[in-house]
Image: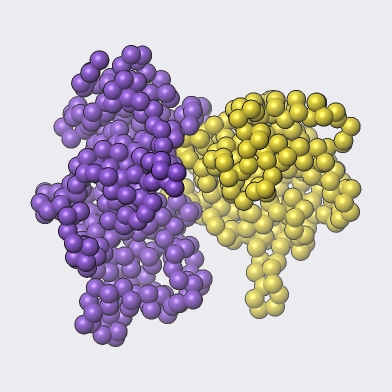
Chain colours: A yellow, B purple
Amino acid sequence: MSPNDEVLLEVKNLVKIFGSGKSAIKAVDDVSFSIKRGEILSLLGESGSGKTTTARIILKLLPPTEGKIIFKGKDITYVNDRKNLLDYWREVQAIFQDPFSSFNNFYSVKRVLNNVFHLIKNNISKDEKEERIRESLINVGLNPDDVLNKRPHELSGGQRQRIMLARILVIRPSILIADEPTSMIDASSRAGILNLLLDLRKDYGMSVMFITHDIGLAYYTSDKLLIMNNGQIVESGDAETIINSPKHPYTIRLLSDVPVLNRKWEL
Amino acid sequence: MGNLLTANHLRAYYKTVQGEEIKAVDDVFLEVKEGEVLGIAGESGCGKSTLASVLSFTILPPLYLVGGEVMVDSKNIFTLEKEILRRDIKGKYISVVPQGAMNSLNPTARIKNFVIDIIKEHFPEMTKEEALRRARERFEALSLPPRILDAYPHQLSGGMKQRTVTVISTLLNPNILIADEPTSALDVSSQKIVIKLFVELLKRNIIKSIVFITHELPLLRHFADRIAIMYAGKIVELGPMEEVIFSPRHPYTKLLMSSVLVPEPGMKEKKIEAIPGVPPDLKNPPSGCRFHPRCPSYIEGICERTSPELIEIAPSHRVSCFLYGGKDVA
């Protein structure tokens, strides 16, 4: 499935200022973009460029200083009540960078996944829940009997990230924000996780937004790239075009900093 | 040029309280030649970091040296007295930048206090002022602002901390610098600056060789002279960079290369593949070739029986796989 033209989420002129007066830092500076249904895009930038702050604002974990977030035509910038927030989070979900701290260490995998049903409308029978959890685990390449009764410390980083993905599969949101989903796991398991994420779009038409500094990952997965520097989006567009002919000086520098296989790296 | 260090049949195991052994480094052969950058690559848990600890003689329980030798100047280091090892070898002949070193700076001490401690440990007669002067000169020579010395670690960025730790670990002009994943927590731009520092250290003859441990093969492509690929405590392929990257021989190296993601035209059409399965539990490694349960070229009746030796298949290119011959003790 390729992206169609239905815009799911739109952010307009987003600004986030931390601190005040002299020490104020503009972490996000007039950022606007939109996510279409079934689209995969990447917000790319170096550490401290404001990409995670942008993601947190979209996830309603942080209020913006200025700007608007419009989801399915509704302005949700100032939505604050629990019911509406839960409705929003049913549609917009995230997986984070550190699979070692995204779990409650005292909960078994079964409990983590069962808790998901608090978010979804709760008229599903126990058997049905179990069935759906098992199905999701198999989909992410884990054997349910192996992992269901384990606790997070008994699993590797790649396995934990897969469980986060199984959680996403149970919820089936329309947008997934993936904040550096593979930076803490091995290159060899990275490919597996990324291919799973690509399948989410193919099978469920899910939109995925990667927040990353890994340009290889962004290029491989995305239709569209947004290059962020110092809180601003300096270049955006079709992934192929940006990688082959970057325009903005910052993008050019960023691309020249990546070690690739067939071009010499100036040291 | 000669070898700065040769390791033979190196074995180092972790011992658990239950009395089990985790064979993290098992029968490893390695040479570090003068003037080279030797890259060591492999998945997490393959024993790369343990190898770094062993080569830098920071073997602390529960890690134990089980066998093998590390030769420096035709002397086996492990037979030396502890005090001599600490004074003359560690930090002076071999120095190490451990994994996550940038977070190991003391948060309540200024960088200069740490630096003075190190220099005074090895040169007790040197005054504080002299030690500090040397450090300042070195920082300037490598174009790091000397004001870093007056800073506390939290005042520095990640890339800056990593460079600071690297410069500090080379203050005593060690022959070999072992760097364990020095850039894996940094973004691409800071990563490049750190790599440039390593190149500069070599150029200025401050260090003679680098052992660079990473899981990023594209990085080694630009920086290493030779690459060793490690799997489950063993070296499975060892050869010149060009050959290992562009015409890998061992099935594991091939799979590693196919999971590499780089932003190059054409990459998008290629479907990258994960290596099926997970690295083995080193408490109980598979019999024979340790890669056989995940290997696409697995030959039944051979691979699970005996462990293939690391044999030379081309000048200075060694592979341990039955596809390239080797003793078949059936």
Whether residue A111 is visible to the viewer of this picture, yes or no, is yes
Residue toward you, B262 or B181: B181
Which residue is at 71% across, 32% downward?
A: A169
> Looking at the picture, does residue B325 appear above or below residue A250?
above
In the rendered structure, the answer to whether residue B115 lies left or right of residue A23 reads left
Which image quadrant is residue A138 in? top right
Which residue is at 53% across, 46% downward?
A: A183
Which residue is at 37% across, 36% downward?
A: B232
Q: Position of residue B293 (x, y in %)?
A: 42, 23
Which image quadrant is residue B301 in? top left
Q: Position of residue B22 (x, y in %)?
A: 39, 41
Residue toward you, A145 or B312: A145
Whether residue B259 is visible to the viewer of this picture, yes or no, is no
In the rendered structure, the answer to whether residue B316 lies left or right of residue A32 reads left
Q: Position of residue B30 (x, y in %)?
A: 22, 42
> Looking at the picture, does residue A77 appear above or below residue B317?
below
Residue toward you, B327 or B114: B327
Which residue is at 31% across, 45% downward?
A: B12
In the rendered structure, the answer to whether residue A204 lies left or right of residue A48 reads right
Which image quadrant is residue B198 in? bottom left
